[in-house]
Amino acid sequence: MVSKPPVNDVGDEGLVIGPPKEYAAGLPAVAWSLRHAGRQMGVKRSLLTLVQVNQKQGFDCPGCAWPEPNHRSVAEFCENGAKAVAEEATVRRVGADFFAAHPVAELADKSDYWLGQQGRLTEPMYLAEGASHYAPISWEDAFGVVAEELTALDSPHRAAFYTSGRTSNEAAFVYQLFVRAFGTNNLPDCSNMCHESSGSALTQTLGVGKGSVSLEDLYQADLIFVVGQNPGTNHPRMLSALEKAKQAGASIVAVNPLPEAGLLRFKNPQKVSGILGSGTRLTDEFAQIRLNGDLALFRALNRLLLEAEDAAPGTVLDRAFINEYTHGFEEFAADVRTTPWADVLEATGLAREQIERIHRRVLDSPRIVVCWAMGLTQHKNSVPTIREVVNFLLLRGNVGRPGAGVCPVRGHSNVQGDRTMGIYEKPSAAFLDALEKEFGFAPPREHGHDVVDTIRAMRDGEVEVFVAVGGNFVSATPDTTATEAALRATRLTVQVSTKLNRSHAVTGRRALILPTLGRTEQDRFVTVEDSMSAVHMSRGKLPPASPHLRSEVAIVCGLAERVLGAPERGDQGRGDRVSVPWRDFARDYDLIRDRIERVIPGFTDFNRRVREPGGFVLPHGPRDARTFPTTTGKANFSRNDLAVLRVPAGRLILQTVRSHDQYNTTIYGLDDRYRGIKQGRRVVFVNPTDLAELGIADGALVDLVGEWSDGTERRAPSFKVVSYDTAAGCCAAYFPETNVLVPLDSTADESNTPTSKSIVIRLEPRSS
């Protein structure tokens, strides 16, 4: 399979490659934030908007889910947060005249960057069957199109309902309620592609699929591991927390195939020392690990801890914690003691001396936090890898006490809240029981489709209608060719969106674009949950980009009423057995929160508590009381096989990454300032030693050719080679340009997450 580059992508012409930066943030980050905001919003609008970001009476940043501290600065946002706000609050507009001038076939040839730069969507648009252009449609007629297609299906399971992490708690709750009242659990969401492996592993081992730490825990930790993560670009406000932890005495070990500027040195732009001084060196030990070597590293550390306990009994492991709160220790320990050092060194690419040096840091650190992101979650063995991280923490009692715990760093700002609200294709029986008790209907019990299974079902003709609230499904998913063909095989695609993206140009036989309010815009307040389980208010201040926009809650409730009928009015829709006050919900979000309170544990007195400054933190058994709602009633040690990812000679392991001008699939610009890339995205970062062995010159033009065990090949053409300090045998390139290289069937065991961080490729030189 071949991915054709969009016609307007910047290639060799205009691409500038310079040295990577040795620090993150500082004065350049401030300048770039203001410059980008000014271009999109204008100076006055920028200043009025940015001072509201992440404030207790303002709106939650539409970027990452990193939590806000109790004491907040006037500028409680990062460079990429400013870019995210500017993209949404832009004064650029996309209306009917734009669609009249641009046929869908032309839009399909444009890059996500070009599409996103056109501006905010302003009115509902409809692509009729056989039409070449979108045309305006009224809201009522748009809802009628959806109702016509959904009610014509011979089974509710022939529709799928996707959700992005930017959706509010209120919108997510009514969305899953609508979908389950309609009769299916086909609720794929963006978690399926990022932290699903974390949720699977943590649920198995600790009983709760969320992180167990707070910001205060980071500040109290003795040692913090940052694994498979680039906070300088993806969660920049995390750098401030790491700086504070360092100042309190913590050590930091960074484990990553690429040296990331933010973890090398951080110049805090909110401090004079960060602007004028040299900044703070964050990382005390950089373990430049080979891709997919993380399980081997933590397994080796666990073996060393066991051996240290053997040498000095009662001084290393927390035997009291292990005996009272855990299950399976002896089986785990017997297995880990057999770990071959040769396999560890081959898998990690690290020297034994460095692993033992990290081990000594562990011995000197009673309180340890392990943070990770998609560098751990997107491998075939991601779930066992994260279970091994939990083993590491359990050995010394580093779960359920201050300064210690698991910290999966989530991406989109309410992706964790979506799952809490029931956006999940495999809901628990307890959740469905509570939903049935509250709303008086029997929700479906059979599991639905996740993202990968949804694509397969569309491909096979088993799903005919696809609805997405937020996101850019086409560019976020693996196997670009298969995904696009699957969507085009449907009868109807519906996108609830703020801005134009590629998913609007890859459609079913009919398509709808339903424009919605953004986080920055005036509406009743909504709530979100950050990656540390804090729930708080978010309320935009800007006038809506268009009088035709509706909130996500209003859109979902309007669709639900049209599709299911309104029994209180005597309507007999597909859901006439369901009595839900959709119109009341759309008028008063407090009514939704009242229902959330009665359905979902932890939301007692929701409406009152969320109005308190800073909101409240949801309960977490392992953190709060060392209670573990697992199948054993205890925290579970696990046995995890060490499999070394070996590749043929002349091949490399590729990981997909974001650029600094990017958040998820939203492309803010064509630069990756920290890595020295300007005006281009089709680059591949390769270790200079590997280039010499392959006989490929720095700056050469190559195709990336993915090779898979079934003998198939996938090709992403026209990438410029950049000699870079990656781990030996490994390389990196940006997504979504490289999504074509990830087969639909290459997924993590147990979580079904695409394996976007371990792609075996060869570099094939191009003649021009």
Image (cartoon, rainbow, N blue to C red):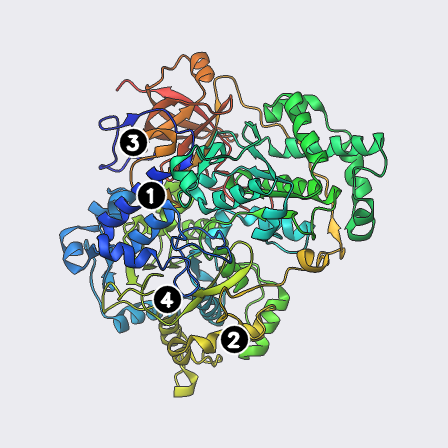
Circle 1: residue type: Val
Q: Can you identify the residue that label 2 sits on?
A: 608
Q: Is residue 284 visible?
A: yes
Does residue 293 lie above or below 247 as drawn? above
Disc 3 on helix, strand or loop? strand
Residue 203 % position (x, y) = 64, 53
The residue nearer to you, when weighing 674 against 150, is 674
Q: Quadrant of residue 519?
A: bottom left
Disc 1 on helix, strand or loop? helix
What crowding class fits label 1: few (fewer than 14 Cα within 10 Å), some (14-19), or many (20 or more)?
some
Circle 4: residue type: Glu
- Label whose residue precedes the other's in the sequence (2 or 3): 2
Residue at the spot 32% in from the left edge and 19% down from the top edge: 699
Does residue 238 lie above or below 19 as drawn? below
User: Marks 1 and 2, how far apart in space?
Assistant: 37 Å
What crowding class fits label 3: few (fewer than 14 Cα within 10 Å), some (14-19), or many (20 or more)?
some
Q: Can you identify the residue that label 4 sits on?
A: 552
Residue 610 % position (x, y) = 50, 70
Q: Can you identify the residue that label 1 sits on?
A: 30
Q: Is residue 155 visible?
A: no
The residue nearer to you, when weighing 737 against 276, is 276
- Label whose residue precedes the other's in the sequence (4 or 2): 4
Q: Quadrant of residue 253?
A: top right
What crowding class fits label 4: few (fewer than 14 Cα within 10 Å), some (14-19), or many (20 or more)?
many
